[in-house]
Each structure stands twice: as structure tokens, then as C-alpha cells.
């Protein structure tokens, strides 16, 4: 990988982000009675997309919003332009990553699954989001935020609307924890702007429909990216898929999520996730997986079905990274998901010099440095920031954060007693074998047992 290309700035990114920041400020005080500074931010947003198919609609929406007369269709146009601008940043960054890694993008295929959606529920969600825009983040209160509860309750039973329900549920929870908005010292302006605009576009009929096809071949896992929150956890397995027909290898993902109590942390998270994704066992054992007619989206997300998978031969992730990864292509990102925060590209680095400066760690390659995000290394595995700092080879995810490219380690090779040792963040995914992991598993099991007993007593009462 050419680290020098990742160190150079990408033209136009800063200018686009400045436009988005100006538009986001308009949502802080709300668009019921906008002030001149808010109107200026909206005008700049409209000018930024003037040459696109969105141009006329966004210009009208900006004019209406500046006058305090915007309707739901105008908020939709503003949200669409905001997401389009972030999409342009995403595409520019991905083009730079393709240059640095030497990997091309593959063509997507598959047909969109059919089925209608409950339009009345989409309209109810859109109405609540419009009320938020009018009130602004400083104007939120419990009465306004609680208006989302019946909408979310009605959305959740609908499988095709669950994505919108999940976004609204998390968004409303954040807003409720921040009420009243008038008392907030700090507002997460970009984050709430992201959630608001994404949720609005998800209220468009068909926005959550995903092209799906099937694949047959061999899956070679690279590593696991574990996401942990107070009430939920997700494991995302990144892998190289080799089609049985000898076609181009693809970068794919398989994910599993589960709700969790905030007392389940560390290795205990795997106990919640394992029953829902057999692939985690293959990752832990260092094996390939043979897939037969496994559903896959046009973006490369495997819709995991155990009946379409069987355990294969041993497959060392570092061999996969050295041999198969360079030839693998990534599938294109869906329009609604084109956002810099979603960039997570598997890469393999070796022959670098790890340099520690305070808490900051960098890998130096050919005289150029790339930042290492050790904060993303989960506690639910044997991989540690110290091991990363002592490593000489790394499988990681290339991300873009705070204006720079960073590597999130998924696994490293280091030397111990003159032997090469591999440490994986997902080594305990299918069950711990080493002493540290077994001890952590036991502690997590004990905690889960206590929680079940307490829950049982409460139910009996």
C-alpha cells in the first residue's frame, strides 16, 4: 500500500465539509423563524449542488426554509443535498484509497426484492422529523421527542421498515437524554445532522430495498470488527470471497447484532453474538467456509444463513491477506450509505516501523506515516494496543476520521521468543482457548447467570 498517497490531502473535501457545517448550523436554532446566518448556510448548500439534478429542488427548499415556510418535501430536498455532498466526499476518499491499494471496484448485480411499504408509517416518521427541524436542537423537549415513540412502535414489526425504526429509536434516545435542548452546552451538530438527514431519506418508499443475489464459493475470513454500545453489540466479519466459477475475488462482510445489558462487557459480548452467527466459530478456529447459494447484497453484505454454509479447510488470515487480498475487489457502496464515517477498507501492512509518541501510535512506511487507531481495539480479545505497537505486520481496516486516514488493527503479527505470533481481535469470537480468554469467559458467564436469576425473580414478582 502506498502510504504517501494517503498522507496527501484530497482536493475539495475541506470545502464540501465547510458547506455542510454551515447548513448544519441552521438546524441548531431551528427553521421555524430562521435568522440571516441560518439562511446563508442554506443558500450555500443550494449553491453547492446547483449543477446537479437536485439543484432546482434544493434552491426552492432553501428559499422556503429561509422564510420559515418549509414543508416536509422541502426538508427532504435539504436532507438529500446534504447526503449527496457527503457522498461526494466518500467517493473522493474511496478513489484515493483505490489508488493507494491498487484495487479496483467490482460491478454490482442482483435484483431488488419486491414488496410494498406502509406509507402511512413513513409519513408519520417524516412528520416528526419535520417538527424536529422546525424546533431545532436547542428547541427540543421531552414532549417533542416522545412523539417518536408511537411511530417507532408501529415501525418495528415491519421487517422492511426496521432499519428506519432502528435509526429513529437511537436518535430519539439521544435527544431524550439531551433534553431540554436550551440547556445544552455542547451539541453534536454533525452527528444529529447525519441522523436527521438519513432518517428523512429512509422515509421515502423503497429507500430500504436492497438488491440481493446469491453466491457460491469459498469464504476466507480476515478479521472481526466489534462494535459495542451500552445496550447493543455488533460483530462484523470482513473476508475475501472466492467465487466457485473462478470469477474476481470480492471483499465481503457478514454481520450479527444483539441487544445487551450494560453490565455485559468484554468477552461476555461473544456469548450474546455466537448463537446467531456460526461464522464466528470459523473465525476463531482459523478456517475457511464453503458457501452455497448464500444471499448477498449488491454492497457485499452476506445475509448469513447457516444452511448455506459449511466449515472448510484451515485458512490463516495472514496468508489470505498476503495472497488473496491484493486481488480482491470491493463492491460499490449504496447511495444512501456513501458517507466518510462508513469507510472501512481491509488492508494489509508489513515491514513498517511502529512509532509511539505519547498515546499516539503511527506506522511508518517508506518514510511516510499513517495513524493507528488503537482506541478501536476491543477488550473482548487478546489483541492489545501494546501488541500493536510491538508488531511487524497488521491486518486492519482503513478509515477516515478527523480529516486523516487511519488504520484500525484487526490482527497483528509480532515476535515472541524468536517466533512469529499472531494476535486477533476476534480470537475469542467462537470460544476462548488461552488462559486469559477462558478466565474472561468464566467471569462473563457468572455475570450473565446473576442477571438471569435477578430477571427471573423480577418476573415471578
Image: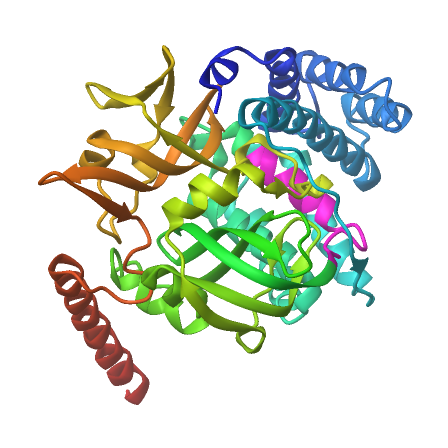
Residue numbers of the magenta segment: 192-211
Q: Quadrant of residue 185?
A: top left
Q: Is residue 406 visible?
A: yes
**Residue 360, position as x, y percentages in the image:** 26, 22
Residue 52 coordinates in the image, percent (x, y): 86, 23
Looking at the rendered structure, the number of numbered marks drawn on it comes to 0
On whether residue 197 falls in the magenta region, the answer is: yes
Q: Judge by depth and name the residue closer to the eye, 352 or 213.
A: 352
Q: Is residue 295 magenta?
A: no
Residue at 72 percent of width and 55 percent of height:
208
Q: Which quarter of the figure is the C terminus placed in?
A: bottom left
Please indicate, yes or no, whether residue 259 appears anywhere in the rendered image.
no
The color scheme shown is rainbow
Left or right of 282? Residue 106 is right
Q: Residue furthest bottom?
A: 460
344 over 370 or under it: above or below: below
Q: Is residue 211 left or right of residue 198?
A: right
172 to the left or right of 223? right
Residue closer to the observer: 54 or 112: 112
Q: Residue furthest left?
A: 417
Closest to the observer, 327 or 112: 327
Q: Is residue 223 above or below residue 138?
A: below
Query: Residue 390: image x %, image y %?
Result: 19, 31
Q: Quadrant of residue 90?
A: top right
Toward which corner of the image does residue 427 lie, by quadrant? bottom left
Measuring from the top left, give residue 275's x and y in whole percent. Answer: 40, 74
Q: Report whether 88 appears left or right of 258.
A: right
Compared with 279, 108 (above or below) is above
Amino acid at each position: 500500500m502506498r502510504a504517501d498517497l494517503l498522507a496527501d490531502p484530497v482536493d475539495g473535501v475541506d470545502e464540501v465539509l465547510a458547506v455542510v457545517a454551515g447548513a448544519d448550523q441552521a438546524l441548531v436554532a431551528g427553521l421555524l423563524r430562521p435568522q440571516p446566518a441560518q439562511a446563508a448556510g442554506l443558500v450555500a448548500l443550494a449553491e453547492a449542488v446547483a449543477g446537479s439534478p437536485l439543484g432546482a429542488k434544493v434552491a426552492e427548499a432553501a428559499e422556503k426554509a429561509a422564510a420559515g415556510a418549509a414543508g416536509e418535501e422541502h426538508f427532504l430536498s435539504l436532507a438529500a443535498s446534504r447526503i449527496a455532498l457527503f457522498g461526494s466526499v466518500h467517493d473522493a476518499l474511496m478513489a484515493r484509497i483505490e489508488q493507494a491499494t491498487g484495487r479496483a471496484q467490482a460491478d454490482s448485480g442482483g435484483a431488488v426484492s419486491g414488496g410494498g411499504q406502509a406509507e402511512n408509517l413513513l409519513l408519520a416518521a417524516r412528520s416528526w422529523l419535520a417538527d424536529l427541524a422546525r424546533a431545532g436542537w436547542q428547541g427540543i423537549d421531552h414532549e417533542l421527542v416522545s412523539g417518536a415513540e408511537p411511530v417507532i412502535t408501529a415501525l418495528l414489526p415491519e421487517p422492511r421498515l426496521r432499519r428506519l425504526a432502528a435509526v429513529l429509536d437511537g436518535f430519539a434516545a439521544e435527544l431524550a437524554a439531551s433534553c431540554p435542548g436550551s440547556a445544552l452546552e455542547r451539541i453534536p451538530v454533525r452527528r444529529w445532522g447525519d441522523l436527521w438527514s438519513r432518517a428523512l431519506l429512509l422515509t421515502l418508499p423503497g429507500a430500504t430495498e436492497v438488491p440481493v443475489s446469491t453466491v457460491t464459493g469459498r469464504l476466507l475470513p480476515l478479521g472481526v470488527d466489534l462494535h459495542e454500545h451500552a445496550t447493543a453489540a455488533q460483530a462484523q466479519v470482513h473476508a475475501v470471497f472466492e467465487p466457485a466459477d473462478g470469477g474476481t475475488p470480492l471483499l465481503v462482510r457478514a454481520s450479527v447484532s444483539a441487544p445487551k445489558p450494560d453490565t455485559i462487557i468484554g468477552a461476555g459480548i461473544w456469548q450474546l453474538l455466537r448463537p446467531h452467527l456460526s461464522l464466528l466459530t470459523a473465525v476463531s478456529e482459523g478456517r475457511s467456509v464453503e458457501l452455497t447459494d448464500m444471499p448477498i447484497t449488491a454492497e457485499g453484505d452476506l445475509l448469513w444463513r447457516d444452511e448455506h454454509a459449511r466449515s472448510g479447510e484451515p485458512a490463516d488470515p495472514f496468508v489470505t491477506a498476503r495472497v488473496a487480498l491484493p486481488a480482491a475487489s470491493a463492491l460499490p457502496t449504496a447511495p444512501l450509505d456513501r458517507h466518510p464515517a462508513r469507510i472501512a477498507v481491509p488492508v494489509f501492512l508489513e515491514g513498517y516501523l511502529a512509532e509511539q509518541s505519547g498515546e499516539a501510535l503511527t506506522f511508518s512506511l517508506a518514510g511516510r506515516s499513517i495513524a493507528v487507531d488503537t482506541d478501536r481495539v476491543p477488550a473482548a480479545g487478546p489483541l492489545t494496543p501494546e501488541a500493536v505497537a510491538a508488531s511487524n505486520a497488521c491486518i486492519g481496516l482503513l478509515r477516515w476520521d478527523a480529516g486523516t486516514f487511519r488504520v484500525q488493527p484487526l490482527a497483528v503479527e509480532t515476535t515472541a521468543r524468536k517466533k512469529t505470533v499472531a494476535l486477533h481481535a476476534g480470537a475469542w469470537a467462537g470460544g476462548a482457548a488461552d488462559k486469559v480468554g477462558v478466565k474472561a469467559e468464566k467471569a462473563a458467564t457468572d455475570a450473565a447467570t446473576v442477571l438471569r436469576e435477578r430477571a427471573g425473580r423480577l418476573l415471578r414478582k
